[in-house]
Amino acid sequence: MHPQHYVMTPEVVYRHAANLLQTQLQWVDYGRKCTVKTLLLVLFYAAGQLCSLSMACQRLRTAPSDQAVRDALRALCPPLETLEQQLNNSFAAQLPKALRQRRQRVAIDLILIPYHGQPHRRVEEIYRGQAKSGTTHFHAYATLYIVHRGRRFTVALTHVEHGADLVEVVKRLLRTASRAGIRPANIPEMTRIPSDSMAILKLISGFRNISDSVPLVLMR
């Protein structure tokens, strides 16, 4: 009996991601040009190519202007906390049932994205850290994930502001994972994690040369 092969095309990936997100976001078309389909296409392209919305709109033949996309996103996106919850619901929806049936080893990353602009509303939105790509200012978020049979499954995501207590960030991720039905096999005693943010920053400072992902806590 020959093994079955399945070709994963860009269209399949787009439809899968779009369906997962739209189930939670419940966006509606913002005018004739900024349809939900178009907005998601621009966002996925920017994420996949690691480029700005402006660059994505220039490269995509059918995309509206970057200003039109920004206006649409401002109108459609809920407050940050609500958007974060919607994204986490999307992650939970695609987790295989097998991951919930037994305890899993988890890891947590701190992601720093260099940013050269101004804060949207508050200065705390911009994380500050060691210089990279010509700036010490970043958009930052942390993720909790599982590697299962060679695949990474993101379980939880949370934004990280400047001055945030990283121990509280870890706890927030663990609570989100628990709500998704994930039981870490390697939750450390909280006393094993340094009790202040500076101690955690010292702990991870040696890893800052690894891509854009800084291991925050790699639990064994």
Image (tube, rainbow, N blue to C red):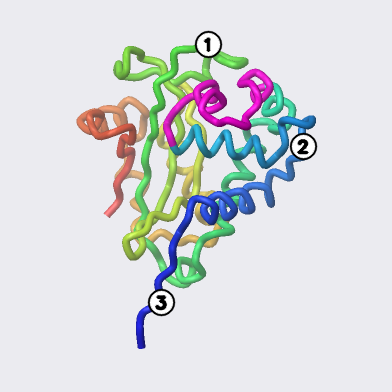
Q: Does residue 215 appear left or right of residue 7 in this picture?
A: left
Callout 2: SS: loop
Callout 3: SS: loop
Q: CA distance from mark 1 to mark 2?
A: 28 Å
Front label number (2 vs 3) = 3
Labels 1 and 3: the sequence-earlier one: 3
Above or below for 185 versus 204: below
Question: Does any portion of residue 168 appear in the rendered image?
Answer: no
Residue 16 falls in image quadrant: bottom right
Above or below for 200 versus 94: above
Residue 205, image x, y percentages: 24, 28
The answer to whether residue 130 is magenta is: no
Question: Which residue is the site of mark 3?
Answer: 4
Residue 55, image x, y percentages: 50, 23
Question: Which residue is the site of mark 2?
Answer: 29
Above or below for 30 versus 3: above
Segment colored magenta:
49-70
Q: Going by the picture, which residue comes out furthest to the left?
A: 206
Q: Amino acid at mark 3?
A: Gln
Residue at screen point 70% across, 22% down: 71
Residue at screen point 33% across, 36% down: 213
Marks 1 & 2, CB-CB < 8 Å contact: no
Question: Which residue is the site of mark 1?
Answer: 118
Front label number (1 vs 2) = 2
